[in-house]
Amino acid sequence: MKNLTDSFVYLGHWPSAGSFGFNTDILATNPINLSVVFGVLIFFGKGVYNLLSLNDLLDNRKQRILNTIRNSEELREGAIQQLENARARLRKVEMEADQFRVNGYSEIEREKLNLINSIYKTLKQLENYKNETILLSNKEQLIKSANGCLSNELHLRTINANIGMFGTMKEITD
């Protein structure tokens, strides 16, 4: 520690070119430093008037910053409003999509039932046609076998009886 103190004392008395040396007296150097700073400010800043103008510049800068913040807040609020509107539209579109999906499924089910009913009716008709065809085929076979068995005279009597029966039925219906 003593070496450190001695080095400052030694620097204070260090002669360079005869009379130049470091002044370690703080009280003597502060007024010199302050006068140099004020001199530089007055020379480059054009005096105290410019210090007031510097305040005006700072106030103007402060107002611009505040205006920028205010504008940013307004833009932020607008963006938040647009976001809310977009979310509302999204919810509406999602609800419509769900409704279309449900309606689509209902329509598909309805069409499926209609198709099943149509196929069922068609199958019933085909079954009836098949049964009529079988019945007709059986009648033809019966008539062929009956024709083969009946003699011509019996056959003529049967035809005459049928004609008579049809004539009676015609008279009843008239």
Image (cartoon, rainbow, N blue to C red):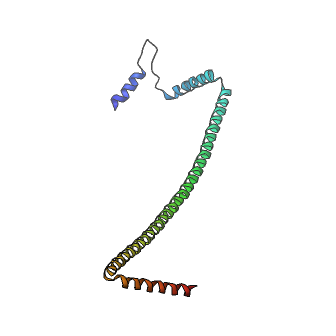
- Residues 95 and 25: in front is 95
Where's residue 62, x and y in %? 62, 38
In the figure, is residue 9 to the left or right of 167? left
Residue appearing at x 41%, y 85% in the figure: 157
The residue at the point 52 percent across, 25 percent down is 29
- The residue at the far top in this view is 17
Quarter of the N terminus within the rendering: top left
Across and down, in percent, residue 171 comes to: 55, 86
Residue 169, horizontal then vertical, whole percent:
52, 86
Q: Is residue 145 left or right of residue 46?
A: left
Q: What count of labels does the image hold?
A: 0
> In the picture, which quadrant includes the C terminus?
bottom right
Identity of the residue drawn at 67% across and 33% down: 56
Query: Is 142 drawn above or below residue 27 in the view shown?
Result: below
Camera-nearest residue between 129 and 2: 129
- The answer to whether residue 118 is above or below residue 166 is above
- Residue 11 coordinates in the image, percent (x, y): 40, 22
The image quadrant that residue 9 belongs to is: top left
Q: From this viewpoint, which residue is outermost toward the right?
A: 49
Q: 24 or 104: which is nearer to us?
A: 104
Point 61% across, 48% down: residue = 78
Q: Is residue 126 left or right of residue 50?
A: left
